[in-house]
Image (tube, rainbow, N blue to C red):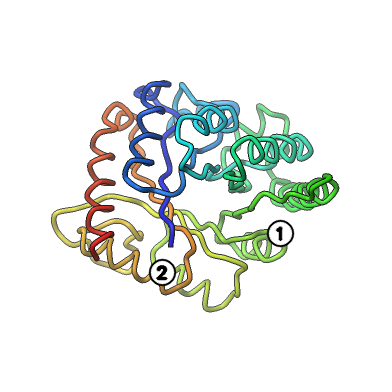
Amino acid sequence: MQLGVNVPNFGPGTDPGVLREWARTAEGLGFDLLMVSDHVAVTPDVAERYPEPFYEPFTTLSWLAGIAPGLRLGTTVLVLPYRNPLLVARMASTLDRLSGGRFVLGVGVGWARQEFDALGVPFGARGRLTDEYLGTLRDAWAGEPDRRTVPVWVGGHSEAALRRTVRFGDAWHPLRLPLARMRSVLGEHPMPGFAPRIALRLTTTPVDGPERPAGVGTLDQVLDDLHQLRELGAGTVVFDPYHGSPEDTRRPREAWQALTTLTTHWRTA
């Protein structure tokens, strides 16, 4: 099972130097995959959670590909309805080629209504558009001379998202769910693959309750989460050390320390 990290590509503490250190830290700790988020228009609803500066994912990952040649690269998740699907197909396949086949395209339908409005995309049609665009991506890649296909991880856990994963995806990519919820879904819906993104918040005392998100709790709890995810068939687990406060981006060393603690003990578990 491979491990990845979701790197904040936004916020007041983020700049090219910090992004470079994130990539070097992840690679140095032995992580396999580095992923970043996606927003195009940082409208007020987006800015509340993910304020400027917000580094565009394809450009950022293209730059980081040369900084950390040992890492796979991906989006968690690209809001697919925001861009023409033929443009996405071209950018994704180009990044995959330039990085030596290291790109993973995580996609989702999006949630920020104001951003949809700013981009002139109908919010109520986002699910239909995502399905349509995924079909376009597959057709576009099938028409390329070498028929190179970028791995597609589909986010979300609604019934529509699960159907979308089975129809178009290479893996189900749920975001920050409790372990019991993921186990239930996998028991009811055979998936082409499983690559969850979970939280990373280490605590000094146990966190109890069925709604505890995977990755939140003591080191022993998080290590047990990893063991259980591996038993559920996870090919990759992506850790998200961002807890929702933009000020956290000014203190990346706290996240780096948590990642260091986790990987050190995981290797010996």
Residue at 32%, 62% (x, y): give it.
Answer: 212
Identify which residue, 204 or 97, lies in the foreground. 97
Q: Mark 1, residues whose alpha carbon is within 10 Å: few (<14), some, or many (≥20)?
A: some
Q: Quadrant of residue 49?
A: top left
The disc, 2 or 1, on the residue closer to the chain's N-terminal end is 1
Q: Nearer the viewer, mark 2 or mark 1?
A: 2
> Which residue is the site of mark 1?
168
Residue 124's x, y, as percent?
A: 70, 46
Secondary structure, mark 1, is: helix
Q: Mark 2, residues whose alpha carbon is within 10 Å: few (<14), some, or many (≥20)?
A: some
Q: Quadrant of the N terminus?
A: bottom left
> Which residue is the site of mark 2?
230
Seen in the image, is 131 located left or right of residue 8?
A: right
Residue at 58%, 48% (x, y): give it.
Answer: 106
Residue at 41%, 46% (x, y): give it.
Answer: 5
The amino acid pointed to by label 1 is Phe
Secondary structure, mark 2, is: helix
Residue 7's x, y, as percent?
A: 42, 38
